[in-house]
Image (cartoon, rainbow, N blue to C red):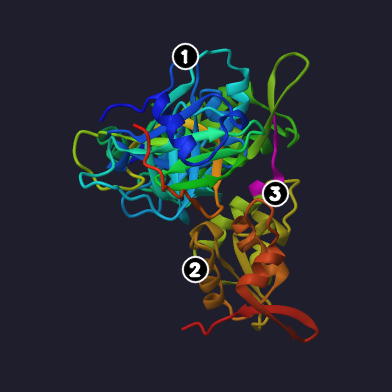
Amino acid sequence: EAASLARSGGAGGLAQWVLVELQGEVAPRQSGGLAGSLLGDLHYTREGVPVLIVGHHILYGKLVRLEKPFAVLVKRAAGEPGPAGPHACYAVTALIKTKLLFKTRPKPIITNVPKKV
Amino acid sequence: GAMRSRGEVDATLQTAKLNPAELLPVVHCLSFGPQAGAGECCLLQLEPGLCAELEAGRSLVIRGEKDEQAVLCSKDKTYDMKIADTSNMLLFIPGCKTPEQLNADQASCDIIHSQIAGFGNNYWELRRCRPKLKKLRKLLMEDPYEGPDNQKDQTSTFSKYTTEDLLNLIQASEEEILHQLQVIDACKIEGYWRILEFDYEMKLLNHVTQLIDSESWSLTKVPLRACLEELGSLEPTEMIEHILLSYGRKHIDDAGEIYFEMHEDKICRAIAHMLLQNAVKFNLLEFQEVWQQSVPEGMTTRLDQLKGLALVDRSSRPETIFLLKVEDLPEDNQERFNSLFSIREKWTEVDITPYIQDLCAEKQTVGALLTKYARSSMQNGVKVYNSRRPIS
């Protein structure tokens, strides 16, 4: 059986997404899973350095132009629950040519002042 | 929950002791989208050229039955797929802008809410591979075409394959499949790709070579029209034309007439095949004599016409020759070498090359393959190759 990776972009072409690469794992702060929960704020310095504030940490990163871009594949419901893996039906939803790589150890934010809400 | 406000963002900046003046005015507030954890999205790392193909609107296809390792095919290339793990977490974010894009954008907003579409710690990696074409011949050999008089053909279409069928079953790109169909001299009969049954193919070839002989045509100028006229009562015209295309090169002369330049090597080879299939092995000298007598007038037989088809045993007394077709051997590299070494313990490079040439990857040489899968030694002053491991 063949699974076709058809472009699902509209007339304007494939969307361009961005990859964010972080060390370690991402775990939800509250129970109930990740969906809908905040990760953090992404800033850029005026020199273009990405800065990510996650929880009580500041991460400094680097913008990397990917030598080998990624295609983002989205599984299309084939009608029946099939096994995961390459035999299901996929559509190419976007391309990723850029990644924000956060490799530096996070700097903790020291809060001895209550945050303004 | 409610979306973050610019005020909240600024408060966080203040707590973090970051100077807003040193930052671009736009912030991305990243949150996990509703489907982020569902695993519906995955990443495929693209080899050079594939990105451009996708952007040009072309599709990629994943092919493979449940018992096969999946491959990815573009219009003309085939790639093995493998999962690569990374120790880092990869998040994929639509609508996330780079500093370049932000600076170019005249929009006045100062906050972008981006939803993470998915995340993971692995991605599909591609590696260009040889198209898996052995199955193509296997499928077409299920029901070889034996000629129009054969009753079998009128009944089932069970093991007959259209181009579409082959695209679904063969792990190769469309261009690689179509090219291979040409290489194996397949033809389309009533919309199905067929291989000719060998005896029928030889019968057709024989009609043509006998006609060439009786008309005293030059082997380099065999006229299509005359062939169809003379032989059309014996065989379907499409089959006559097919055999001419298989064993000759098509030309058009100044008067617009089609003629064929016959492939001497290919004809001699086919006749050798016909002779050799009748026994396990032959006395080499006797075979060479019969072979030369069997080919059309004006053609010269040479043993090098039989590369990949037959093997000469120069160690036996008398010397012998036997049929050994490369297309009957396994497709996998290690299995191919195991098979060859079980047929003969030690091989010279000259003898083994025709039986491993097709295994070479894009820029790989036969020498590289031998280094990897065989061990060399000297025998009577000649370099020979044997198996790296004991063969049972």
| Amino acid type, callout 1 | Ala
Tell me the residue that label 1 is attached to: A11
Q: Quadrant of residue B212?
A: top right
Q: Nearer the viewer, residue B248 or A32?
A: A32
List the residue tagged with mark 3: B265
- Image location of residue B7, percent across then percent down: 41, 25
Mark 2 to mark 1: distance in Å? 48 Å
Q: Whole-percent x and y of residue B218?
A: 76, 34
Q: Secondary structure at mark 3?
A: helix
Residue range of the region highlighted in magenta in the rendering: B260-267
Name which residue lies at 71% across and 14% down.
B256
* Quarter of the figure with residue A100: top right
Q: Do circles 1 and 3 both sit on a common chain? A: no
Side of B361 relative to A28 (left or right): right
Read off the chain for label 3: B
Q: Which residue is mark 2?
A: B335
Quote the CA–CA distance across marks 1 and 3: 53 Å
Q: Quadrant of the N terminus of chain B?
A: top left
